[in-house]
Image (cartoon, helix red, strand yellow):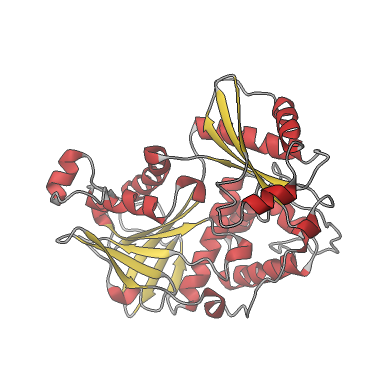
Amino acid sequence: MGRADPLFTRRRRTRNHPKGFNEPSFTFLDDVAGIFWQRQRDVLARWYAAYGADPGADLRKRFQSEREDQHLAAFWELYLHEVLRRSGHRVKKHPDLPNSNRHPDFQATCDERSCYVECAAVLRGTDLSRKAERLVDQLNDELQSLPSSDFFVHCEVVTEGDRAPSAKAVRRHVEAWMTAHDPDAVELGLRGHNRFLDGPSTIWKANGWTLELRLDPRRAASRGATPLRRPFGGLFRHRMLGPSARKPIRVALDEKATRYPRLDHPLVVAVSTEMAFGSQEVFELVLFGEHGTNLSPRQRREAGVDGFFFSKAGAKVGAVVAAFDIATWAIARSRPTIYLNPLNPIDNRLIRGLPFGVVSWDVAANARKVSATGSDMAKFFELGGNWPGINRLHD
C-alpha cells in the first residue's frame, strides 16, 4: 500500500457521535475518533498492505464506496484474503481461467491442491425489503429527536404497504406510548424474561404497513443522557421469514455457480450475509434442503425440497463458506462456517489450517454432521484479548 493511496484518510479525528442510520459505513468508520475505531482501521490497513497489488485500486475504491453492498463485499474479500494468507495458502488474485474471460476472486493453493474462491455479500435485495429498510432508516433518524432516552425501541416491519407512511406520524405514536411507561417498572417486569421479545408492545398500522414495537429499558446510569441508539445497529429490525429469507442467498449461490461452467479446479463460494436473512439454520436449509424429509436426493429434487448442493448448479461447488453479520468490530469473535458439499466435497487438504467451523451432511442418515468447531479468531488474527475494546460512543 503506497503512501498516496491509504485505505483510510490520514488526519486527526474528533468525531464522537454515533453513526447515522442513513450514513454509509465507510464514511463513519473513516471519520469517527476513539481507540475502539482506530484499532479497526489499523488492522484493516495492515490487511490491505498484505493484499498487495490492487490494479486500478479496485478493492480500495469498492471498500470506500458509499454503496453498502460495494463496501461490505470489498471488506469480505479483504477478510477472506487475510484468512487464506494466514492459513498458509498461496493466494492468486483474479486468476486467468482456461476457455473463459472471467476471473474468480482468488485461486488458493495448499499442498499442491487448488480451488477457486468467489466472494458474495448478500444484503436485503428485494424491492419490498429495500423499501422497508428505507422506512426503518427514516424511523431510526426520526426517533433520535425524542425527548426521552429511557428506552430502546425494538420494531419489526410485519407487513409492507405500497405507499411509505409518515415517519413523523410513527414518532408521535411512539412518543405517546413510551411516555406512558416507567423504565424501572418495565425493568422489574422483564426480570427472568427475554427483554427483546417480552417488553411492553404496541402495533402501528397505516397504508398497508404494520409495525410491531417493543420497549427495552436502558441501564439506569445511561438514561436521559445520550441518543436512543443500540450498540452496533439500529433500533429497528425488518422481519424476514420463511422462504423470503432463503431466496436472496440461493440466488447468489446459483449466480456464482453458473458463472463458471467449466473449471479445472473446484469452486468455493464464500457468502457474507445479514442476520436479517435468518440464522445458521436458514443457511443450512438453503444448502441441504428441508431437514424433515427422508427422501433420496432424486426424490428431494422432485419434491422441491432439495438444497443447493443437490442441484445441478451446486454439484460443481465443493464448499460454501457462510458468515453472518460479520463486521469490522466483530472479526475477533465472528467465526464463519465451511459447509462441505456432501456429494462432491472439496479436498480436505484445502481447508486444513482454516480457522472456520466445518459442517457437512450425512446423506444416508439425512443428518447434519459437524467435522470441526473452528479456532479462536482473536488468536488467529493475533488481535489480543478484548479487541478492539469498549465502544465509548454507546455508554
Q: Position of 364 compared to 215: left or right?
A: left
**For the point 71% across and 62% down, which residue is it?**
5
Q: Quadrant of the N terminus?
A: bottom right
Q: Nearer the viewer, residue 260 or 227?
A: 227
**For the point 29% across and 49% down, which residue is it?**
308
- Report x, y in % for residue 132: 57, 33
Q: Quadrant of the C terminus?
A: bottom right
- Report x, y in % for residue 220: 77, 57
Q: Position of 388 compared to 270: left or right?
A: right
Q: Can the viewer see residue 130?
A: yes
- Report x, y in % for residue 18: 76, 52
In the rendered view, tell whether residue 118 sits above or below residue 304. below
In the rendered view, tell whether residue 108 sits above or below residue 364. below
**For the point 31% across and 47% down, which residue is it?**
258
In the rendered view, tell whether residue 179 sits above or below residue 41. above
Q: Nearer the viewer, residue 297 or 88?
A: 297
Q: Where, by quadrant of the figure, is residue 79 drawn?
A: bottom right
Q: Where, by quadrant of the figure, is residue 143 drawn?
A: top right
Q: Can the viewer see residue 265?
A: no
Q: Nearer the viewer, residue 374 or 210?
A: 210
- Report x, y in % for residue 24: 68, 47
Q: Position of 299 compared to 292: left or right?
A: left
Instruction: Give the total of numbered labels.
Output: 0
Q: Position of 135 compared to 240: left or right?
A: right
**For the point 79% across and 48% down, which residue is it?**
227
